[in-house]
Amino acid sequence: MTFFDKKWVFVTWARDVTDLHGIKHIVCRGSRLRKTIWLIFVCASIGAFTFMASSIIKQYFQFNHSTKVDIVATNVLDFPSVTLCNFNKYRTSALTMDDLRNVGLYLGVVDENHNLIYPHLYNDEFVDKLAAVNWDDVVEDEDYNMTDFTIRTGHQLEDLIQSCKWKEEECGEDFVLSLTHLGACYTFNKYNEGEEFNSHNSTTAGAANGLQLIIDIEEIEYTPTNDLDSGAMDAGVKIMLHRPTEPPYVKELGFAIAPGLHTFVKMRNEKITSEPDPYTECEQFGDIQYFDHYSLQACRIECETKIVEKYCSCKLPEQPGDFRVCNPAETHECAHEKLLQAIEGLLPDDECECRSPCEVVNYISSLSSSRLRPGFIKRLFQDTHNMTEEYIQQNIAVVTIFYEALNYEEINQIPEMSITTLLAIMGGNMGLFLGGSALTIIQILEYCYDEAVGCCTAHDDKKKRPKSPVVVAPVNTIDSTAAGAGDSRTAWGYDNNGVNGNF
């Protein structure tokens, strides 16, 4: 195969086969100036297409995304779980001498001699009771049950929630116990693992179709402690709205309700769907051990649990799993210390890598309040409680939680450039600059394939042919005789009419 044969194959392919614009004007007959101008334009078009194509491909692999926000109206909205915790973790009246002997020193209630550290913060009855105790008769228990202590000394449901109404109907039985960093808390509309979940839902917006609670914070029972930086200066309750399948994380994420006020919590539902990797770093499935559903709160709780177990060989009562619960000394000398360090990010080797799930439901709330009328509350409970107006002003809080509108905000992340968009833009640029299409690419690949096969075939023939002098006649014109007397095809599979003879 000679140079001229290869040149003839390309000329025939460029003139009669390919659909690329401009190529045929370079090889067809014409003046050198005309061919040179066409060559310049073809090279410029190829350069422009290459630049545009590389820019588009680079943009695609940046994996940028855009956000679509929509307001979706609906007839039914699932009501969230409502977890309620008193700011006070332990009731003074529930503390026994065994409790003070085993836990009092670690909580900062008594000193090493079992004297109250802040006696002016307790009532006279409790101070006298403590002074009369013979501490030699009280035995310290190294395996003191901290779970029982937390539940028993926490505020009890029947004392904390004086009234519960869901859509104007009684709902006290819908609360279940939930242990958190704030101690014994109670959750309305909670999901129980392994059981069928029947959620409460709202079919109409407004306060009359929500949850109303009348709460007694029992400020007289407040016990100042140093337990997990408990806010001894605060009086009231903390509330968190969350999905029923998510565990509560009230201490860090809840909002506060003060006594003496009727607080209205109007909320709206927000559903966020994020694109998984490589667009964002959201967690699509999540690998958690103690919860049925992955959430950011569940991941953080599990991470904190593993940190406490690693450093203290035990866990706190509110943490999940079957690991041994810490005794009082381990709880306050190790577990709480490591937990605070983890929350504050002081354990760099054990940082929690918790990513937000790709599908998130948030309850965005806004609060407003009005002052309670103590006289009305007193008449409301006159048959069951002997409350003074002063007590009501300092201890009773009313909260109403409801949807402000029967719709939800849907926020979806979508890829800025998909495969379809990439192909469309690439095809548009190819058509604009080169006049080509996907089939044109097939033609180029076909030509390259034929060239490769032709080269290999010519190389093999050259090895088999005996060596003999070869006389190359000058070729001025190309006709059917130059290609072969008895065959109108070239050695590369194209005949002189530009038709591929191999197919």
Image (cartoon, rainbow, N blue to C red):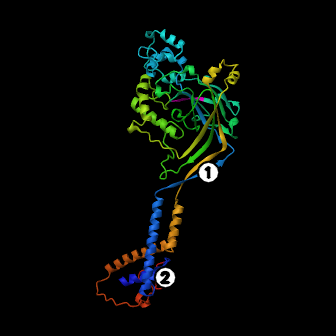
Q: Main secondary structure of the magenta part?
A: strand
Q: Amino acid at mark 1?
A: Asp
Badge 2 element: helix
Let me know if residue 389 is in the magenta part.
Answer: no
**Residue holding disc 1:** 70
Q: Amino acid at mark 2?
A: Asp
Label annotation for residue 201: none
Disc 2 vs disc 1: which is toward the camera?
1
Inter-mark Cα distance, 2 to 1: 54 Å
Span shown in magenta: 176-180
Q: Position of residue 220 (x, y in %)?
A: 56, 19
Q: Residues within 10 Å of mark 1 (few under 14, many from 20)?
A: few
Q: Earlier in the sequence, mark 2 or mark 1?
A: 2
Q: Residue at x 33, y 80 (%)?
A: 462
**Residue holding disc 2:** 16
Q: Residues within 10 Å of mark 2 (few under 14, many from 20)?
A: some
Which is nearer the eye, 440 or 184? 184
